[in-house]
Structure formats: structure tokens, C-alpha cells
Amino acid sequence: MAKEKSIFTCNECGGTSPKWLGKCPSCAAWNTLVESSAVAESGVRNRFASLAGTAEVAVLADIEASDVDRTPTGHSELDRVLGGGIVQGGVVLIGGDPGIGKSTLLLQALDSLQRAGKKTLYVTGEESGAQVALRSRRLGLDRSQVSVLAEIQLEKILGALGAQQPDVAVIDSIQTVYSDQLTSAPGSVAQVRECAAHLTRAAKSAGVCIVLVGHVTKEGALAGPRVLEHMVDTVLYFEGDTHSQFRLVRAIKNRFGAVNEIGVFAMTEKGLKGVSNPSAIFLSQHAEPVPGSCVMVTLEGTRPLLVEIQALVDSGGPSPRRLSVGLDRDRLAMLLAVLHRHAGVACMDQDVFINAVGGVRIGEPAADLAVMLAISSSLRGKPLPKGFIAFGEVGLAGEVRPAPRGQERLREAAKLGFTQAIVPKANAPKKPMDGMAVHAVERVEEALQIVRSWG
């Protein structure tokens, strides 16, 4: 092996130093030197070699494009998030809170892939082999033939990948892996960046799919350098409360599929199981309609989901509170101003609380109309009719703007038994829908007048 030593490179000017200094000797910037390694001997391999093979310059139109081959993991919800399955040579980064189920899901997926004839390797840096075996028995995988390696040294992991030549490998977790080429501790920026680069290069050159498990910070972002997310092909986030039964896996980056796709899982005694009808999670089971509740249809990737929006308006005194869970709080303040100015519904002396049921986070503005109708319903103490949905973006002028793929939203609601809807005029179906009465509106006051006419 080539003899290597550590150097320190400035993030500002690119200058180097043989030892760490508080100030860069080249540009005099403070705290910009980051550890990396350099080959000390000449004539050795280039550790910064390209991840992909060098090719001739070609015209884009002349390059033959073909769909990538995907291998299903045996879990339909995970395949949905990945874009259909794992890809040969792909690198996946998955992060989430401690104990949310990352290792459980990946161990189940590896077992399914192994039973389908794929060669698998599970590299654990946080547990012993006995602990992984204990978990597999708890999940009902007593006779699992998944290969397990308890190791945190990068060079030994790369040696095992070369010797075993698996089709799929899991590194749990990237923050525990270290390289002898660097002197910093495992989990540092330099170690995470260096180890991830070597593993990515190994995946591309050998055609093995590598899944990296990443830790998250207390703010919920993936720990380590941001370059880690740029380096991999797919980034998945585990969402949900560890005290709740349900988990969401969201794709925020996917070079082989759609982004913002979600998979819904339920944590059971036998591990994570996919949920075939996730809309049932986000709808409360009220025996009778209650004030302050309105159902909307949101889009998560390619999947329409029905989510219940709940509002509670109560006397707030001189300093009313505005609290939003699962929706943007600043947008709530804007909607309250629009509601007052254009519909005559005043909440300036009221506490207003908004909640998206089931722990789902809604980022699209199509929830505006449902939020405003839920607030009006709570303030009036009058429930919306049973089997009612609404969606649409509301502008500052009080206009109701269309939501993307409105026809798909309506079809999903009709399939689940909803019979009435208030939607933007641009989203109204050209032909009447069987079993559903659709009311098209252009302004928010029109929507409120329709609701009030129902009593």
C-alpha cells in the first residue's frame, strides 16, 4: 500500500499546510483548514480518480440511452421511494432519528434480496454480529443467510467487498467508518467525506449497490458534510415519531426516480410492514362530523393522499397565539389576513391552532382552502358535511388558484367514498363525476358562502 500522510487544505483558497493551523498561511482566513490525505510517494495511484470511467467526447443526441435495470427489494413501499428498486452501482444514503427503524428496514430488505438470489453483505459498525443476529430472530428471520461483517476500518471493508463481491451491501453507519489515511476521529468531516468517496468509487467500479446509513443532527439534517448528499445517487429520510406506529420514508434526491416520493410503513412486532392504503392513517375516525375538521387531497410524489386538517379557534385575549403543526406557520398568518380582508372572518383576538393529522408535513399551497374552511368551521361551531373535501391555493387577492393534477386528486377522493368537493374552477372536471358533486369556485368568499348555505 502506498505510504500516505495527512495534509490540511484551505476551503477558501485551496492552499495547503502540513499541519493544522488556526489561520491559513496563504489567504490568512481563520478556521478554514480541513484535513485530507495525500500520497507521499510519486508514481502511485491517483486517489482522486474519477468515479466513472473516462470516455471519448460524444454528441448528446448520438449517445444511446437505456433504462437502468432495477431489482425489487421485496418491499413495495421501499421500491416506490427508490423508483422501482435498487440499481446496480447505485449509492443510497438513508438517514433518520435514532430508533426509528433504519437498520430494521434494511435488514429486512437484505433478507428479501438474499432469498431472491442476490448476494448481500451487512456491515455493522455500531453493533456486534450477535446483536444483529438477535434482531433478525426478533424479526422472524431465523434462517437468514445474509452475510454480516462487524467492522469500522475502511480498508478492511473495501477488502471484504472485493472478496465477497456482493450485489448489495449496507454500511451501518457511515459515521462509524474511519480510514487509516487520516488521523481524525470517526465521524469527523474529513473521515465521513473520505470514506464515502472511497465507498462510492467501489460501488461504481464493481457494480455493487451500496446503502449508507447516516446519522442526523438534533435539527433533523444529515450529519457530516453537505458534499455527502451530493456524492450519492439517492437520499432518503425517515420521518415520524418514534412513539407512533407509522413511519414515512421520503426521497429528497433520486437520480433514478422521482423526488418527494414517500413510502408508508407500520412498525409491528415483526418489523416494518408497508401500508397499502396510507390515506387511512391521516384521516381521523369521527362517528359524526365535528367543527374545525376539513379533509384535503395532497400530492406526495406521484401519490395522492387524503389528509385531515384540523383547526381550533378559541378566545385568545390581547396576545393571541398562532400555532401550526405539519403546515407553514407564516402561511397560516397570511391566510388569516386574507380570511379577514376578503371574507369578513375576523380572528385577530382568537387563538388559532392548525394540525395535519397523522404527523404528515404538507409543503404545497394546495392546503390553503382546506385550512381556511377548517378555521371558519371551528369559529362558527358548525361542522362541514360528511364526505366533504377541498383543495386549492389561495392568493393575497382572495382568488382560489388551481392545484396541480387536480383530476387525480378528485378521483382518489371519489374512490374512498367522498361525495362533495370544493375545488378551484380550473380543476373542475369537464364531465360530471359519478357519486361526487364538485363545486368550482374562483374566490375564497364563494367557497365560504357555499359552506354556509349547507347550515
Image (tube, rainbow, N blue to C red):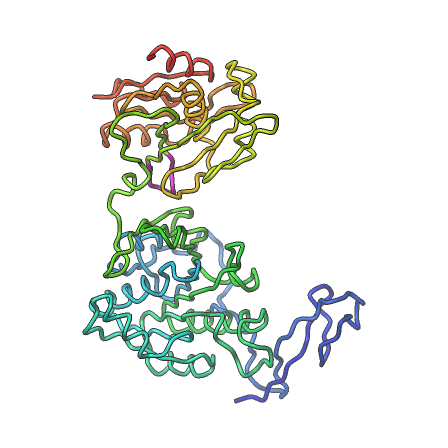
- 332 with respect to 117 (left or right): right
Q: Looking at the picture, does residue 272 appear above or below residue 332?
A: below
Quadrant where the C terminus sits is: top left
Q: Does the magenta stretch include residue 340?
A: no
**What number of labels is visible?**
0
- 351 with respect to 428 (left or right): right
- In which quadrant of the rendered view does residue 158 lie? bottom left
Q: Tell which residue pokes out farthest to the top in this image.
A: 453
Q: Estimate the x, y position of residue 256 in percent, counting from the top left.
A: 39, 54
- 41 with respect to 145 (left or right): right
Q: Estimate the x, y position of residue 408 in percent, counting from the top left.
A: 31, 32
Q: Estimate the x, y position of residue 100 in percent, counting from the top left.
A: 38, 58
Q: Looking at the picture, does residue 219 appear above or below residue 358?
A: below
- In which quadrant of the rendered view does residue 133 lie? bottom left
Q: Which residue is drawn at 52% across and 20% down?
A: 339
Q: Estimate the x, y position of residue 344 in percent, counting from the top left.
A: 52, 13
Q: Which residue is drawn at 40% across and 42% down?
A: 360
Nearer to me, 55 or 293: 293
Magenta segment, principal secondary structure?
Answer: strand
Q: Looking at the picture, does residue 180 appear above or below residue 331?
A: below
Q: Give the range drawn in magenta.
A: 298-305
Nearer to me, 390 or 304: 390
